[in-house]
Amino acid sequence: MTDPGAPVRLRKLASWQTGRVSTLGARLTAARMPLESRSDFAVLAALEEYGELSQAEIGRRLGLDRNNVNGIVTRLDDHGHIERRTDPADRRRNIVAATEAGLRHLRELDALAQQVQDELLAALDADEREQLRLLLEKTLTGHPAQPA
Amino acid sequence: MTDPGAPVRLRKLASWQTGRVSTLGARLTAARMPLESRSDFAVLAALEEYGELSQAEIGRRLGLDRNNVNGIVTRLDDHGHIERRTDPADRRRNIVAATEAGLRHLRELDALAQQVQDELLAALDADEREQLRLLLEKTLTGHPAQPA
DNA sequence: AACCAACGTTGGCTCGACCAACGTAACACG
DNA sequence: CGTGTTACGTTGGTCGAGCCAACGTTGGTT
């Protein structure tokens, strides 16, 4: 039972439940940081792990479309968290790289994200959390990160 | 690995993963029916399972705020899927009840939802699906269905 | 009688997912 | 060599969902 109890028809739908968990996560996130930090965090994490990326590549890896990536990158740039320059080898591309300040910001956001995570999964023990993680990951396999 | 591979920092966050699964669900849903049908489905499911409800109660049970409930109920009313009348016992309340057509519509939507569910969880076998369901449900326990 | 709380309703805000279109640039192929 | 196709980044806009704020009505409290 979710709280006062959600209808069975809904409790059986993974898309509904994940939606509620996701919303809850956003709510808890918003309590600790500007909500937009979520996308910033994602992009910075990608840059940290993979190094310089073009905007299109960022979108592909994170499942964001290039429209939104543009906005996020612009915001990160305004805050000095990334650097953006055109790829000399392919002048259509923008090479995006995290700055020192960006990496610092990433670590700050990560700490907050961990707190949110903990609060969100409060009802689950360590094993269950890992199981959930694996099941969600497996669910995602085979599905395109992008629309059609 | 999600697809080309999402950063580890993100793969470890349940809120991120649930968000992606949820988005995927919305995408698959939109391929089969108008996206707004999701809320309609939820409200109709609540009315079917609990009988007549006030708008505020609907919101509480589904985790929607009364603003959006109002819009959904209005839409359902326009389509003849519910009936709305003021509660004679408490004239602040609107009693919302599903009509025959509404229940029929609910069953149609449910069939489509099952297809989406199947496609969404294609990578999971029956046991894993049940496990996922239970873990998500457990995650939700103890969290208020509503904001602050 | 005065006050407070709940309800429905309206209007507005933000965020994220999406679609459409444009100009630029790289590439493939005849 | 040109020509068409494709990929990029960018701008502008739509839609759904989650929120907040405010109002008038109504019910309960004290």
Image (cartoon, coloured by chain):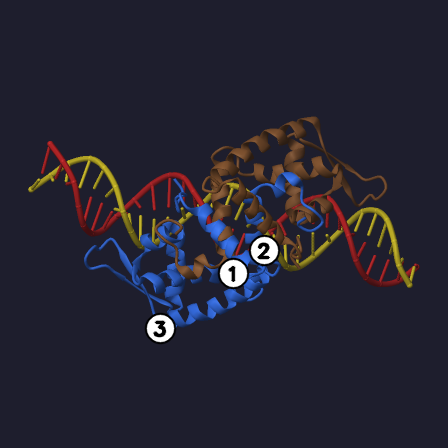
Chain colours: A blue, B brown, C red, D yellow
Q: What amino acid type is highlighted by mark number 1?
A: Leu
User: Relative to B16, does residue B115 appear above or below in the rendering?
Assistant: above
**Picture coordinates of residue B56 (x, y %)?**
72, 47
User: What residue would you read off at disc 1?
Assistant: A35
Number of the label disc, if any, that sits on residue A100:
3
**Picture coordinates of residue B70 (x, y %)?**
67, 43
Q: Nearer the viewer, mark 2 or mark 3?
A: 2
Q: Nearer the viewer, residue A83 or B113?
A: B113
Task: Find out whether the residues at labels 2 and 3 contact each other: C-beta distance under 8 Å.
Answer: no
Left or right, residue A114 beside residue B143: left
Tell me how far mark 3 sits from mark 1, CA to CA.
22 Å
Left or right, residue A91 beside residue B51: left
Q: Residue at x 73, y 46 (%)?
A: B57
Chain holding disc 2: A
Q: What amino acid type is highlighted by mark number 2?
A: Leu
Label 2: state its secondary structure: helix
Chain holding disc 1: A
Q: Residue at x 54, y 58 (%)?
A: A127
Circle 2 residues within 10 Å: few <14, some 14–19, many ≥20: many
Viewer can see residue A33: no
Tell me how far mark 2 sits from mark 1, CA to CA.
12 Å
Q: Are marks 2 and 1 on the same chain?
A: yes
Going from N to C along the chain, the mark reached first, 2 or 1, is: 2
User: What residue would you read off at disc 2?
Assistant: A24
User: Relative to A133, does residue B72 appear above or below in the rendering?
Assistant: above
Circle 3 residues within 10 Å: few <14, some 14–19, many ≥20: few
Going from N to C along the chain, the mark reached first, 2 or 3, is: 2
From the image, which quarter does the C terminus of chain B lie in?
A: bottom right
